[in-house]
Amino acid sequence: MLRRGRAPGSGIRSRRATRSRCTYRQTAGGRSRTVVDLLILDIDGTIKAPLLAISDNFYGAAERARSAGLRIAICTGRPLAGIAAELAERLGPGQPHVFQGGALIATPSGTQVHADCMPDSGVRQILTAAAGQQLHTEIYLPLHAWFTGPDARTACRDDDERSLVSREELRSIAVSEPVLRIVIMTTSATPASPVAVPSGVSWHAGHSVQIPGYIYHSYTVPGSDKGSAVRRLCRCYGVDPARVMAAGDDIADIPMLEAVGYPLVPADARAELTSRFPMVGACAEDAAVEIIERALSLRGEI
């Protein structure tokens, strides 16, 4: 029997709750427990701290969760390659995960469930404008990423899955392959896109714990974000978003956190998140382990 319970996050440190959330409790063996059917985790700043390897404690906690029947998916801005592909395989082999900031839902082996491909004309317009200003530019395909120009990331990324090419090669790849996302890097927080935003394309600016001091300008099709991807992912898993826990640390994670019943953020997440959502410990202090343990506790597993 299902009944309304107290708002999730009770007992979790939180500066301010922006809206009340209802949890669902299910009676099992005479004991009431909260149901969490799916756990969705961002990678950078949530599972993985900058320049640090993912801890064995995390993998141990994830294995305990899987053994208890809790499914785990990742929702990352990374392409389906490198550490993102490895994590997806370890956490949910054969199951769908979210990559490219929500533009791609696919299994670790590369089977695509959904892809938001940018219009060819918009891709050409952005790349031409970026080349004219000699801006650092990246294009993201379903299974790989390519970049050109001054590389703001290489010195900061310890697990880079991108490939360096010339601007001519970048344009050639973009013409022949479906592009899910374009990223332009700048060193100042400009209030607007550094290039004109074409019709049929949306733009937003953000930050990354991997590249402090830089702004990334992301171009995708309208409506392509982690929130829409998580709602689609829930349909793939056949679960109610109200019974999903998700954790992230950056502005791009806000739509994902707003889409689920149990949002959590690390204590060292951006202020825009820690002021709105319940917190756990810092990422470098195994926040992801605490998140998994909280999900298991709500399920009555520990």
Image: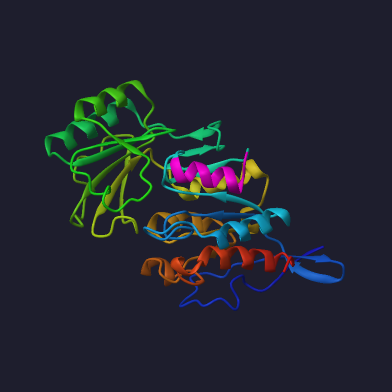
Residue 274 vertical position relative to residue 228 in the rendered view, above or below:
below
The answer to whether residue 185 is left or right of residue 144 is left
Query: Which SS type dominates the magenta stretch?
Result: helix
Q: Quadrant of residue 179?
A: top left
Q: Tell me the residue at 48%/54% (across/down).
A: 42
Q: Viewed as shown, does residue 240 lie left or right of 127?
A: right
Q: Position of residue 46 (x, y in %)?
A: 47, 60
At a point 21% along the width and 30% down the height, the residue shown is: 166
Nearest the eye: 265 or 143: 143
Q: Is residue 184 above or below residue 55?
A: above
Q: Nearer the viewer, residue 51 or 206?
A: 51
Q: Is residue 243 visible?
A: yes
Q: Which residue appears at 37% of the width and 59% of the height?
A: 50
* Magenta stretch encompasses residue 253: no
Q: Is residue 232 visible?
A: no
Q: In which quadrant of the rendered image does the N terminus lie?
A: bottom right
Relative image position of residue 261 (x, y in whole percent): 59, 61
* Total marks placed: 0
- Residue 220 place in picture, x, y as percent: 36, 39
| Span of residues in magenta | 82-93
